[in-house]
């Protein structure tokens, strides 16, 4: 017998931020002994299990090991020092220079060089250097490297993004990465699954970012530790892959090991250029992906129902990603910089949303606007659609694809006392520069905030049509 | 195996993130040694020169320690400062795994046991960790107490192997 803890979050009224909680305890039907109902994450663990060295510890075969220049060079140096400068499979290793690019100083140039030399030495063909490089969690999905049912690791906490494709994708440290590179395995305590059902009608001005901020407020920054967060419900079913990536990207901000979505027709459409030779048609691919879906009767450690009808845009106020408020509570707060980009919200959909609010307008003279399209393809597509022009006409600085500003490494570091309205994922004290304050928000809130020079509510602005 | 224990550094806050433990601007370093001077640099209220901070070997803290970025630079900066044990109410998963992967200890204790340890925060507290029987003993001007702890068998094996690379290399 399984006990579900189900929590429903329903708005009490349009524009109100106080929500009503109705906690139910449901006792599910007896579990059938013959059929073991599994969650998507459990199915992946079962299919990738290499070893269980101790009860509760599962060593998995890894399908994709992703590397960037910040956390990989020390692993490479250690492998060299151990006389084990090898890779388990060069085709399963994907490499990008993305955090500080182009290099800003000797140290970052060295990091790039160590990664570049290593990739060449081991004939890793999927290596993305200047000109082809972009933010890892936007670039690698765009290249078609992630498939439903995959296991993915990277020395980067936002690896959970790739769960949007129905993969188990976990951020790891450099040592896990090093073993991944050498042996193609990684050890985990098998995570439990938290299910979030997002239903209702998404209001104008509300996007995936608002929904995930609202969820993190509910879960808190540690509520999903050692858990996978499974996103379900009507709203998620209709979401683009970009929006699903935004949801899954911030699973780590609630402590989650991976975000995860059921791979469906929208997943197939996104992946079709890469999988069309594997299936006779899209329908066959959809049917095949269906096997990964969480089974009816599987076990969730917690279920949360969220009705987004009437929800207002969300924004963070303090130094933790669960310090979340409705935008109306924060409206009028002056900002010095607006940043649109990152693995959370630097995709074409995000740039398009912001551009709809910015078209034909200019940002407040007191504000520095920075936009960083997350990959060269996004940059090129945004250019083709006239979006880059809209940003530039509005007074934004358009930077090359890079993670730089999000973690205060380059391309938009704050001075002490400055405030940044940002579409990124972390508002930690000093995150974008020592002494700086970060408010996390959607591209829509960021765009109208740039227009006003202070935090503003996109519901009060008209969206322009783009070509 | 390394020895674990020594002077305790108390960090009385929950949700201390790895940006606070080692800010991102130092992630351009490619040696662990270069991190040494920057331990807890962005943690508000922490003074590395204060007498209670100097010579610490063990960190005692609250819930969700090491949340945020996956950077293993966080355990490394502790290692470079001769701290190889963190005792907390709970850890963020990646930080916890990084500690064990480096052959260091991340010990979780219930909230009341952590509060008990905090009562010894008089600037002289020492923690001795005994891995043979999974206990730790804190002693200070306020007395001496022994607390049992549990760590997963796998995590203990990593500590005994000196880390995950050696363990995995021997086994897979």
Image (spheres, grey):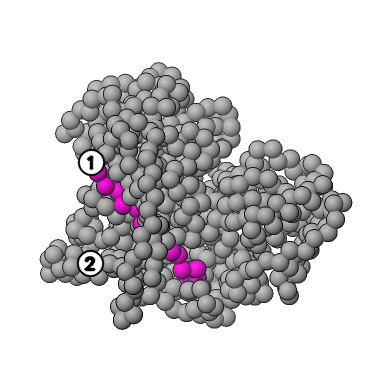
Q: Which residue is mark 1?
A: A201
Q: Is label 1 in a helix, a strand or a loop?
A: loop
Quadrant location, the C terminus of chain A: top left
Residue plotted at (46% across, 68% down): A190
Which of the pair A250/A367 is nearer the observer?
A250
Please state the horizontal and vertical placement of residue A386, each as a whole percent of the image: 22, 33
Q: Using the rendered image, report if marks 1 and 2 lie on a common chain.
A: yes
**Residue A15 highlighted magenta (yes or no):** no
Residue plotted at (41% across, 48% down): A250
> Mark 1 or mark 2, which is nearer to you?
1
Residue plotted at (87% across, 51% down): B141
Q: Residue furthest right?
A: B141
Please state the horizontal and vertical placement of residue A457, each as a whole percent of the image: 34, 27
Q: Which residues are magenta?
A: A185-200
User: Would residue A294 be visible to someone looking at this image?
Assistant: yes
- Tag of residue A6: none
Tell me how far mark 1 sits from mark 2, CA to CA. Answer: 26 Å
The reply to whether the C-beta atoms of the residues labelled 1 and 2 are less than 8 Å apart is: no
**Residue A192 highlighted magenta (yes or no):** yes
Q: Chain of mark 2?
A: A
Which of the pair A115/A335 is nearer the observer?
A335
Q: Which residue is mark 2?
A: A290
Which of the pair A121/B106 is nearer the observer?
B106
How would you rate the neighbour count of disc 2 (Cα within 10 Å): few for under 14, some for 14-19, many for 20 or more?
some
Which of the pair B29/A425 is nearer the observer?
A425
User: Would residue A70 be visible to someone looking at this image?
Assistant: no
- Please say if A203 is above or below A334: below
Residue A220 lies left or right of residue A446; in this view the side is: right
How would you rate the neighbour count of disc 1 (Cα within 10 Å): few for under 14, some for 14-19, many for 20 or more?
few
- Please say if A108 is above or below A166: above
């Amino acid at each position: 017998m399984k006990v579900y803890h189900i929590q429903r979050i329903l708005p009490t009224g349009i524009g109100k931020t106080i929500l009503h909680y109705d906690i139910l305890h449901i006792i599910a039907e007896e579990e059938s002994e013959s059929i073991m109902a599994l969650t998507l994450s459990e199915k992946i663990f079962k299919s990738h299990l290499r070893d269980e060295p101790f009860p509760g510890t599962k060593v998995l075969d890894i399908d994709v090991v992703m590397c960037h220049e910040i956390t990989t060079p020390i692993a490479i140096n250690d492998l060299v020092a151990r006389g084990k400068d090898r890779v388990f499979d060069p085709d399963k290793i994907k490499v990008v220079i993305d955090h500080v690019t182009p290099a800003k100083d000797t140290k970052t140039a060295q990091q790039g060089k160590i990664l570049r030399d290593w990739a060449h030495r081991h004939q890793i063909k999927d290596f993305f250097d200047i000109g082809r490089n972009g933010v890892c969690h936007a670039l690698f999905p765009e290249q078609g490297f992630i498939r439903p049912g995959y296991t993915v690791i990277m020395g980067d906490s936002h690896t959970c993004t790739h769960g949007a494709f129905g993969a188990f994708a976990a951020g790891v440290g450099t040592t896990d990465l090093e073993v991944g590179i050498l042996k193609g395995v990684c050890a985990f305590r098998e995570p439990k699954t938290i299910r979030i059902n997002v239903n209702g009608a998404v209001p104008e001005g509300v996007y995936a970012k608002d929904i995930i901020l609202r969820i993190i407020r509910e879960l808190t920054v540690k509520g999903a530790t050692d858990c996978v967060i499974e996103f379900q419900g009507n709203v998620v079913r209709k979401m683009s892959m970009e929006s699903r990536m935004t949801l899954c990207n911030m699973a780590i901000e609630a402590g989650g090991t991976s975000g995860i979505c059921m791979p469906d027709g929208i997943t197939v459409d996104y992946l079709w250029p890469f999988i069309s030779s594997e299936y006779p048609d899209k329908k066959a691919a959809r049917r095949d992906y269906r096997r990964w879906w969480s089974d009816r009767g599987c076990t969730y450690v917690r279920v949360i129902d969220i009705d987004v009808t009437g929800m207002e845009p969300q924004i963070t106020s303090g130094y933790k990603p669960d310090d979340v408020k409705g935008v109306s509570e924060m409206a009028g707060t002056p900002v010095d910089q607006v940043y649109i980009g990152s693995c959370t919200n630097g995709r074409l959909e995000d740039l398009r949303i912001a551009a709809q609010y910015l078209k034909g307008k200019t940002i407040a003279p007191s504000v520095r606007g920075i936009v960083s399209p997350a990959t060269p393809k996004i940059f090129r597509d945004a250019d083709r659609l006239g979006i880059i022009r809209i940003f530039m006409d509005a007074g934004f600085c358009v930077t090359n694809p890079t993670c730089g500003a999000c973690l205060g490494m380059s391309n938009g570091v704050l001075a002490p006392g400055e405030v940044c309205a940002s579409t990124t994922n972390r508002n930690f004290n000093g995150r974008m520069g020592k002494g700086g304050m970060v408010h996390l928000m959607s591209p829509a809130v960021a765009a109208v905030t740039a227009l006003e020079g202070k935090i503003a509510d996109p519901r009060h602005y008209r969206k322009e049509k783009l070509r | 195996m390394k020895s674990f224990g020594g002077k305790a550094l108390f960090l009385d806050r929950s949700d201390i993130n790895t940006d606070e433990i080692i800010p991102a601007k130092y992630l351009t370093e490619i040696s662990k040694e270069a991190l040494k001077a920057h331990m807890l640099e962005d943690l508000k209220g922490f003074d590395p020169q204060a007498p209670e901070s100097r010579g610490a070997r063990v960190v005692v803290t609250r819930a969700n320690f090491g949340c945020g970025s996956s950077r293993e630079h966080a355990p490394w900066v502790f290692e470079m400062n001769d701290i190889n044990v963190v005792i907390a109410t709970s850890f963020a998963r990646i930080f916890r795994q990084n500690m064990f992967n480096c052959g260091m200890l991340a010990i979780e204790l219930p909230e009341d046991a952590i509060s008990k340890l905090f009562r010894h925060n008089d600037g002289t507290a020492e923690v001795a960790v005994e891995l043979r029987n999974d206990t730790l003993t804190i002693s200070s001007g306020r007395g001496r107490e022994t607390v049992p702890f549990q760590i997963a068998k796998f995590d203990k094996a990593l500590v005994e192997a000196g880390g995950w690379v050696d363990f995995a290399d021997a086994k897979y």
